[in-house]
Amino acid sequence: MSKKRGLSGEEKRTRMMEIFFETKDVFQLKDLEKLAPKEKGITAMSVKEVLQSLVDDGMVDCERIGTSNYYWAFPSKALHARKRKLEALNSQLSEGSQKHADLQKSIEKARVGRQETEERAMLAKELSSFQDQRKKLKAEVEKYRECDPQVVEEIRFSCAPVTAWNSLCRQG
């Protein structure tokens, strides 16, 4: 006895769309709950869930008329949706290609006058050594910062009210 495997969500969605495309009709939920298990093997319990996911994705249209909801999807709508998506993707591709070409041109412009010469390499090396020296000097200045007269004066000034208060408290 082999166990029967259920349909995946994507298979259910595909089969549900086949119902709409083959019949080219408008359905109510109860009609689909009867039709889907017989024709496409979609369990009646999952019809509503599958149908709602298709409606949410814009693949099936839904309209409430009175107290009933009607569902439909025609092949021409799917074709037009794919065409619009293809046009949007093609325009994005052309914009991306144009931007790529513009960036390539700007790279070529930037390279003009920046050919790797011996003088340029020497200047780059000198710049690097100056940057290293600057870092070392900054570290040394930071090490002696607490001995800086301005910093010491700022510390004294900020602590002056506290020391005055402390001396008053000791006297009294």
Image (cartoon, rainbow, N blue to C red):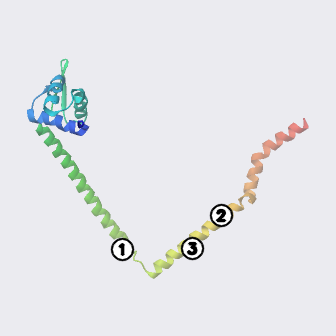
Nearest to viewer (mark 2 / mark 1)? 2
* Residue denoted by label 2: 139
Q: Is residue 77 left or right of residue 7?
A: left
Give whichever of 100, 114 is nearer the camera.
100
At horizontal 14% and vertical 29% (from top left) the residue drawn is 38
Cα–Cα span, label 3 and label 1: 26 Å
* Image quadrant assignment for residue 97: bottom left
> How packed is label 3: few (under 14 Cα within 10 Å), some, or many (20 or more)?
few
The C terminus appears in which quarter of the rendering?
top right
Going by the numbered disc 3, the residue's amino acid type is: Ser
- Residue extending furthest toward the front: 1
Going by the numbered disc 2, the residue's amino acid type is: Ala
At horizontal 13% and vertical 33% (from top left) the residue drawn is 20
Position above or below: 105 against 71:
below
- Residue extending furthest toward the top: 67
> How packed is label 1: few (under 14 Cα within 10 Å), some, or many (20 or more)?
few
From the top left corner, tell me how far across and down residue 40 is, in percent. 15, 33
From the top left corner, tell me how far across and down residue 48 is, in percent. 23, 27
* Image quadrant assignment for residue 115: bottom left
The N terminus appears in which quarter of the rendering?
top left
What kind of element bears circle 1? loop
At horizontal 20% and vertical 32% (from top left) the residue drawn is 42
Q: Which mark is residue 26?
A: none
* Residue denoted by label 1: 112
